[in-house]
Image (cartoon, rainbow, N blue to C red):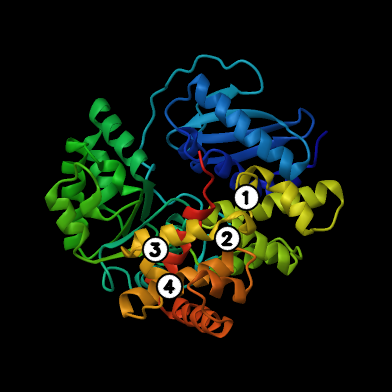
C-alpha cells in the first residue's frame, strides 16, 4: 500500500509525535528529535529520513525502524520502507536501509560551519500552540518576555522540569519569534554541542567552532544537564557564556533539574545559570490537560467528546507529549476503522497506557488515608478522631476529597468512615479543597502526586 508523496510528508508531525512517544527512555529518542523526512517515493513505497548524526549503528537503526514504522502504520495505515541518511552538516552522507539488514557505516569528513544555525522549527511549536495553565504560566510568560525583549528581560532564562512538559516547545517558540530580526539564532541540543566540540578538537577546527557560537545573536541550548561531568566541554561553554552575556546576547537553557541539582557541574556555571531567571515547569493540572487535548484535537479538525477528553486527562497525567500522542493515536484509529471517536475507541487505542491502572472503585480508602497520613505526618487514629486541631483538619479534608474523587463511596459513607461525620461536613471539606486547589499550585501538585501514587499498580 502507498500514498501520494505530499500526503505522507504532511503527516510527518503526527508520525514524529508517536515515534517520540514510543522511543521515550531509549537511546534513539534524541536521534528522532534530530530527524526530518526528505522525500517519499510512492513507487518504491520508501520514506527517506535524514538523521543529524555522525554515525548510526545497527541497534539504533533497528530502533528507528521499529518506532517510525509502527508510528507510520498508526497514522497512515501502512508501514513504508525506511531509508535513513546520516548527516552532521545538513547534507546526507550515508544511506542506510532499515527495512532489512543494516550495512556498516563509515564517517566522512566535512565542514561543520553551519551546524548551529537554527533548525527548521517544527510545525505547531510556537507560542500560539502552547497551552498555558497554572503549572507553566510563569515559564510561558518569561519565555514570551525574552522573545520580545532579548538580552534584557531575563538573561539567561533557565527552564527546568520533567520530560514532555513543554520545555523544548518554548525553546522553539522563542527561536521562531526571534528569527525575523535575528538571523544568527543558534539552537542546538547539549548532546550535539558536546559531540561537535569533541569533533572540533579532533579535527583541529576549534576556532571555527568558537566563532560559530560566539557570533550568535542568541544561543538556545536544550538539555544543558548533559554537560554533567564533562570538564573540558564545561570550560569551553563557560567562556562562550561569558562572551555572549557581556555582549548582551540572549541565552536560553533547558534542563531536567535546577542548576544546583545537576551532578558534577562546576560552581561557576551554576552561579551564572542563576544570574537571570530559573523557572520550573510542573506537570499540568487536570484542567490544563483537558485544554491540551482540546487544542490538539482542534488542530487536527476532529471532534473529541467531553467524556473522552476527561478520560485522557485522568489517565495521562505527567507527560504532555504522551497526551498529544494519545490524541494522534485515537484520531488514527478512528480514521483507519471508520468509527467515530467514543470512550470505547479511546480505551482500545490506549490500552497499552491504561490497562495496568486500577479504576477509582478499586482504590481502598485505607490506602488513601495511609498516603495522606504519611505525607502530613499524622496518625490514622488521630485523623479519624473527632479532634479538630488545624494540623489534623486539613489532612482530613484532603483525605475526604481524595476518597470522593477516587472511590464510589457516597458522602454519607465517607462521613461514616471518617469518625461518624455527617454528609454536610464531608461536602464542606470537599468544596474547601476544591476551592484551594484552584489557587494553590503547591496543593494542586500534591493532589496530583497523591493520585499518581494511589493509581500506581502494586508490583
Do labels 1 and 3 touch, CB within 8 Å? no
Q: CA distance from mark 1 to mark 3?
A: 50 Å
Image depth: mark 2 or mark 3 in front? 3
Describe the element under mark 3 as helix, strand or loop. Answer: helix
Q: CA distance from mark 2 to mark 3?
A: 49 Å
Residue 269, relative to residue 226: is it above or below?
A: below
Q: Residues within 10 Å of mark 1 (few under 14, many from 20)?
A: some
Q: Earlier in the sequence, mark 3 or mark 4?
A: 3
Q: Earlier in the sequence, mark 1 or mark 3?
A: 1
Residue 419, relative to residue 172: is it above or below?
A: below
Q: CA distance from mark 3 to mark 4?
A: 10 Å
Image coordinates of residue 304 in percent, x first then y, are 74, 64
Q: Earlier in the sequence, mark 4 or mark 1?
A: 1
Q: Name the residue that disc number 2 marks.
A: 124
Image coordinates of residue 94 in percent, x first then y, are 52, 24
Q: Is residue 73 visible?
A: yes
Do labels 1 and 2 touch, CB within 8 Å? yes
Q: Name the residue that disc number 3 marks.
A: 380
Q: Name the residue that disc number 4 marks.
A: 396
Q: Is residue 283 visible?
A: no
Residue 458, relative to residue 410: is it above or below?
A: above
Image coordinates of residue 317 in percent, x first then y, are 53, 58
Describe the element under mark 1 as helix, strand or loop. Answer: helix
Describe the element under mark 2 as helix, strand or loop. Answer: loop
Image depth: mark 1 or mark 3 in front? 3
Q: From the viewer's perspective, is 212 left or right of 235?
A: right
Image quarter for residue 174?
bottom left
Q: Name the residue that disc number 1 marks.
A: 13
Amino acid at each position: 500500500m502507498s500514498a501520494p508523496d505530499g500526503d505522507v510528508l504532511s503527516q510527518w508531525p503526527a508520525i514524529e509525535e508517536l515515534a517520540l512517544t514510543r522511543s521515550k527512555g531509549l537511546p534513539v529518542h534524541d536521534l528522532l528529535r534530530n530527524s526530518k523526512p526528505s522525500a517519499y517515493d510512492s513507487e518504491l513505497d520508501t520514506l527517506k529520513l535524514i538523521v543529524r548524526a555522525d554515525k548510526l549503528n545497527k541497534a539504533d537503526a533497528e530502533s528507528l525502524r521499529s518506532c517510525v514504522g509502527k508510528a507510520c502504520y498508526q497514522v497512515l495505515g501502512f508501514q513504508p520502507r525506511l531509508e535513513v541518511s546520516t548527516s552532521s552538516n545538513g547534507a546526507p552522507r550515508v544511506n542506510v536501509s532499515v527495512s532489512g539488514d543494516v550495512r556498516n557505516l563509515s564517517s566522512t569528513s566535512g565542514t561543520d560551519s553551519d551546524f548551529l544555525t537554527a533548525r527548521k522549527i517544527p510545525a505547531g511549536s510556537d507560542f500560539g500552540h502552547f497551552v498555558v495553565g497554572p503549572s507553566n504560566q510563569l515559564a510561558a510568560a518569561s519565555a514570551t518576555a525574552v522573545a520580545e525583549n532579548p538580552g534584557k528581560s531575563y538573561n539567561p532564562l533557565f527552564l527546568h522540569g520533567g520530560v514532555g512538559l513543554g520545555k523544548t516547545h518554548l525553546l522553539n517558540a522563542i527561536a521562531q519569534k526571534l528569527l525575523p530580526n535575528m538571523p544568527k539564532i543558534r539552537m542546538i541540543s547539549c548532546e550535539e554541542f558536546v559531540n561537535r566540540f569533541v569533533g572540533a578538537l579532533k579535527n583541529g577546527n576549534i576556532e571555527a567552532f568558537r566563532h560559530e557560537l560566539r557570533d550568535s545573536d542568541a544561543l538556545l541550548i536544550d538539555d544543558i544537564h548533559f554537560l554533567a561531568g564533562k570538564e573540558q566541554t564545561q570550560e569551553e561553554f563557560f567562556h562562550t557564556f561569558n562572551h555572549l552575556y557581556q555582549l548582551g546576547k540572549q541565552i536560553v537553557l533547558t534542563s531536567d533539574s535546577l542548576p544546583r541539582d545537576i551532578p558534577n557541574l562546576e560552581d561557576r556555571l551554576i552561579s551564572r545559570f542563576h544570574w537571570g531567571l530559573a523557572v520550573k515547569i510542573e506537570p499540568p493540572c487536570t484542567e490544563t490537560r483537558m485544554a491540551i487535548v482540546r487544542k490538539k484535537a482542534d488542530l487536527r479538525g476532529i471532534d473529541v467528546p467531553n467524556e473522552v477528553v476527561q478520560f485522557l486527562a485522568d489517565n495521562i497525567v505527567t507527560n504532555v507529549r504522551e497526551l498529544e500522542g494519545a490524541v494522534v493515536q485515537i484520531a488514527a484509529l478512528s480514521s483507519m476503522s471508520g468509527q467515530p471517536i467514543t470512550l470505547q475507541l479511546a480505551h482500545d487505542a490506549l490500552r497499552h497506557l491504561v490497562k495496568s491502572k486500577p479504576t477509582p472503585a478499586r482504590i481502598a480508602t485505607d490506602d488513601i488515608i495511609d498516603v495522606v497520613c504519611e505525607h502530613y505526618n499524622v496518625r490514622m487514629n488521630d485523623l479519624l478522631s473527632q479532634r479538630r486541631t488545624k494540623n489534623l483538619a486539613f489532612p482530613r479534608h484532603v483525605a475526604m476529597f481524595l476518597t470522593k474523587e477516587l472511590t464510589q463511596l457516597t458522602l454519607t459513607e465517607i462521613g461514616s468512615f471518617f469518625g461518624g461525620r455527617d454528609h454536610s461536613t464531608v461536602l464542606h471539606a470537599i468544596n474547601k479543597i476544591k476551592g484551594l486547589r484552584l489557587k494553590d499550585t503547591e496543593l494542586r501538585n500534591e493532589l496530583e502526586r497523591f493520585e499518581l501514587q494511589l493509581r500506581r499498580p502494586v508490583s
